[in-house]
Amino acid sequence: MAKTRMVHQFGMGTSLRRMDYTEAACRAVRDALWHNSLSVAEAFGVEKSAMIIEAEIGVQNPDAVDLDKVRAIFPYGQAKVSVRAGGLDVPKPDSDAVTVIANAAIIVSFDMEPAS
């Protein structure tokens, strides 16, 4: 079997007031997922639990993201979540606070037999 990429999804999420990197990351993942209604598993006769999900999140403070909370968003499949420097912190005027912007890239793959 070969791992075959089937879907790319992209999203953006924010934390406007609390500087919550986890919430911004979760919102970015939800943004990516909720724009689509995927039936690709059913189309190929594969169980949804067989989805291989790779989610990459970009935020300015990667260590502040709770990976378990982000992983819990996925309703099925085998989710692997990674976080790296990216996104954007937008300074607020007259304050030390920032608006946190997170970006998410989600790739859905399956182990499939190559076409012959």
Image: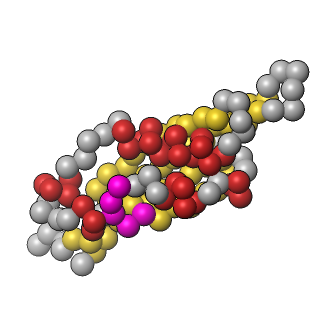
Q: Is residue 74 left or right of residue 40?
A: right
The residue located at (55%, 61%) in the rendering is 68
Q: Is residue 49 left or right of residue 28?
A: left
Which residue appears farthest toward the bottom when viewing the image?
A: 1
Tally the marks: 0
* Coloring applied to the structure: secondary structure
The residue located at (24%, 61%) in the rendering is 48
Q: Position of residue 27 (x, y in %)?
A: 52, 40
Q: Position of residue 115 (x, y in %)?
A: 14, 69
- Which quarter of the figure has residue 112? bottom left
Magenta segment main secondary structure: loop
- Which quarter of the figure has residue 53? bottom left
- Answer whether residue 116 is visible to the viewer in this image: yes
Quadrant in which the C terminus appears: bottom left
Please, is residue 106 above or below residue 34 in the view?
below
The residue located at (73%, 50%) in the rendering is 61
Q: Position of residue 39 (x, y in %)?
A: 20, 49
Residue 19 falls inside the magenta stretch: no
Residue 78 falls inside the magenta stretch: yes
- Which quarter of the figure has residue 2? bottom left
* Stretch in magenta: 75-79
Quadrant in which the N terminus appears: bottom left
- Answer whether residue 56 is visible to the viewer in this image: no
Q: Is residue 96 left or right of residue 71?
A: right
Q: Position of residue 75 (x, y in %)?
A: 35, 55
